[in-house]
Every structure is written in C-alpha cells, then in structure tokens.
Amino acid sequence: MREGSLEAPTRHVLDWQNPWFWDDKALEAEMERIFHICHGCRRCFNLCDSFPRLFDLIDNGSTGEVDGVKKEDYAQVEEACTLCDMCFMTKCPYVPPHEWAVDFPHLMLRHRAVQARKNGIGFVDGQLADTDRAGRLGTFAAGLANWATDETNTLTRPAIERFAGIHHGARLPRYDGETFEIRAAREATPVNQAAPAFGKRKAVLYATCYVNFNRTDIGAAARAVLAKNGVETEVVYPACCGMPKLELGDIEAVAAAARQVTAALLPWIDKGYDVIALTPSCALMLKFEWPLILPKDPAVERLSQATFDVSEYVVDIAKKDGLAPGLEPIEGGVSVHLACHARAQNMGAKAAEMLRLAPKTRVAVIERCSGHGGIWGARSENFEIAMKVGKPAAQAALKNDTRFVVSECPLAAEHLMQVMEMTAGEKRPEPFRALHPIELLARAYGLMEREP
C-alpha cells in the first residue's frame, strides 16, 4: 500500500440494487470506518461544514475518538454535505485505487438514500426537486413567479420561508418567459460555412432544466458560438437529469431519469451528433453519475462517452480544428469561478482555457467552492453556512478586480454574486454581472450585446 493519491482517482459503482446497500448496520459500520480515516487525516477541514462537524463530534465525544460519537449524530455530518465531490477530487489521499477506498460524497449519498427509503421524502422537498414541473409553471407565469421569489419581496418571501423552508434572503433563480426549446425553434442561427470545423461536427444541445426554463441566454450564446465555428446544432430537452433528486437520495428516480433522457438522446448519437450539456452538474450526471448508477446499461455508457461540457467542446474545436476568426479582447478582464461539478469531471479548467482564446484578455481563476450546493444553500438552516463557505471565493473575485465574474454553474454564479455583494458592501465595483463563460465568449465574437 502506498501513502497518498498519486494515481488518478477512480470511482466504484453505486451498488444500490444490492440489499447490503440499504442495511442500517452495514451503513453505520462503513461510516465509522471512513470517519476513522478522516479523523486521522483532517485534510478536508476547510472544504465544507461536514468535516468541522465530524471533527467537533469526535473531539467533544466521551473518548476523543470515533467510538465516542453517537450513531444518531452521524446524520449531522451528512446534512452538511452538498455532494460537490471536491473532497474526493482534490483533497483525499485515500480515494480508490487506494485500498482504503474512501468516497466520502457517495457515502453521504448512501446515508441520504437509506433515510429517504426509510422515512420517505417530504412533500415540499419532493416538489422543489421536481424542476420540470416548477419550470413549466414558472415559465408560464414568469412575471408573477419572479416577483414572488425576489429576495427583496417582504410580502411573499417570509411566507415561502415558512412553507418551503427557503431562507428569505437567498437569491433564487428567475424564470424566462419562454423555454429554450421554443426560443431555439424561433431563432435562426446560420452556420458559418467558412469556419475550419464546418462539416466535421454537429451537436445536439441537452438544454438542462436550468437553461431551458431559467437562463435561455446561455443556450442562445452556445448556439451562436458553435454556429460561428461551423457546428450545426439541435436542441433537445426530454427531462431533468435528476441531480436535484440525487441530492435527496432518490436514486431510483435518478435511474428513471437516466433511462428517459438516454432514450431521447441516443438516436442523435446514432446520427453522428455529439452531445453537449449546457451546465456542469448535468454534464457530470451524464458522464459519470449515471454510469455508476446503471453500470450494466450499454446505452447509458454510450451516452457518457459522447457527452461534452460546453466549454470543453469549444476548447476541443480550437485544438483539433481551429476557431473561426473574429474574437476580440474582453476588456477589463474576467474572473473564472471553476464550479465544483466542472472540476469533478476531471477535464481540467476548460472555462478558463476557453476564455483565454480571446486575445489580450486577463483571466483569473477562482478554485474555491461558491457554497450554494443546489437547493442546499437556499434552505433556511443552511443559508448562513453557504454564505460562509462561499466567502473565500467571493474575496478572491473582489481581489482580482475584474470587470466580469463568470461560472459554468449558473446557480454558483448567482450565489457568488450575492456573497460578493454582501462582502464588498458599498465598495462593489460596477458593472458587476454573473455570466456563463460561453456568454462572454459570444460577446467577444460580437454575437451578443457587449454590455450585460
């Protein structure tokens, strides 16, 4: 056995169809085993609140060791986990192929899944995780929905907090008045036949629930940049990837979503299309999480191999085919927040690499978690923790003093903006906008308005 984690980390499949996975005693034994390892290492103390909670439980226990922690208190550690994967990807020296095989996020997911099966998923939690239903309703009544969910609305937000447990100060996603699918069908995007990649590539954009219902500008920018570079695109949105339900431990629902989305996207792969997921959490699901949940499904594996993150895809075009000319500098520079679920794809800092394609552009990289964790950071009991976790990233962005701040994860970007606003106060620079990197590249090409 070698100390450290010099080999590339690998993940074991989620053995959720094995009765052992759901056994309380087996789960407690595995948590105790891994907590012993974490106690002896403590390298992850500053990543999120899970590890300080664990170490406080140990240090304040009767023995100062893991055996002094009550089993019922293990849930406190799991409740603070956002499933960001950063302990697995960047810190832990004992991940597989090390024989201790520590996968802390998937252990927390297993605990969450066991509790969900035993106790059920609450009605409100289930509704919040149904992003397709919420998206259809929100898009249909965008004006009303955006008014009601605005964090400055003192009439509705306290009521939302009482009913849904969403902190009244948490900034929530806004809805567009039409879906990205409808917008893409309405807007013509001529393909640049003079581009080096023309005729070599075509891609189907998996819209993702967030881009389809909340931020269609991200999808429009992706289509425009790809068309500029000679890539024919189609837009498909069969359903949510299931990440919100994974966060609740509803693995069976995630498996069902995987089968549904795979069935819709596979015919495009058969026709020679690449698949591009427009947000990193969804790309992570298609590339990595689905094959671990359905390891014997060849269709899921084929989709995994054909899927790209949008920044990854543009960088691949630049390296293999060459980009179309016309990129202008991004004046004032840009701070690129590397979203946790982009980093977990183990593909490198593609967002920063993509924006460096714009000439004479200062690109600063932020490698700290924004703290949002999907719906986790908006919950009343977690909001202050989410703000605390995101503060180092916000301070780094403010120190960079760039005109733009971007993140591949739109939720992370909005949360980071809120933390920056609270951190900077009246010293906040203008203009101050959270964008997706592909939106900024589209501006550098002159394909979208230069001012947000």
Image (cartoon, rainbow, N blue to C red):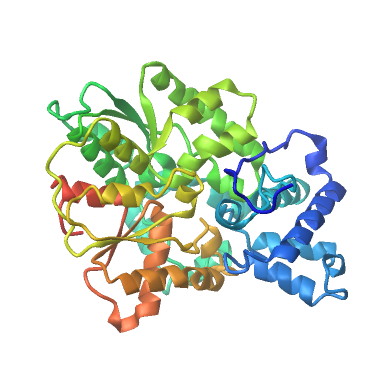
Furthest residue in direction bottom, as rendered? 426
Whether 356 is drawn above or below 222: the answer is below
How far across and how far down the image is residue 287, in percent?
50, 35
Percent of width and height locating residue 92: 63, 56
Rendered location of residue 47, percent (x, y) = 57, 65
Q: Nearer the viewer, residue 192 or 234?
A: 192
- Figure disc tally: 0
Residue beneath the point at 78% across and 34% down: 18
* Residue 178 seen by the camera: yes
Residue at the (68%, 66%) spot, across then down:
42
For residue 314, which quarter of the picture? top left
User: In the rendering, at what x and y percent does residue 275 appear?
Assistant: 39, 30
In the current view of this chain or complex, which residue is farthest to the top? 271
Image height check: is 34 above or below 275?
below
- Based on the displayed image, in which of its 4 quarters is residue 319 positioned? top left
Q: Is residue 153 visible?
A: no
Q: What residue lies at 57% left-to-right and 52% top-to-bottom?
A: 85
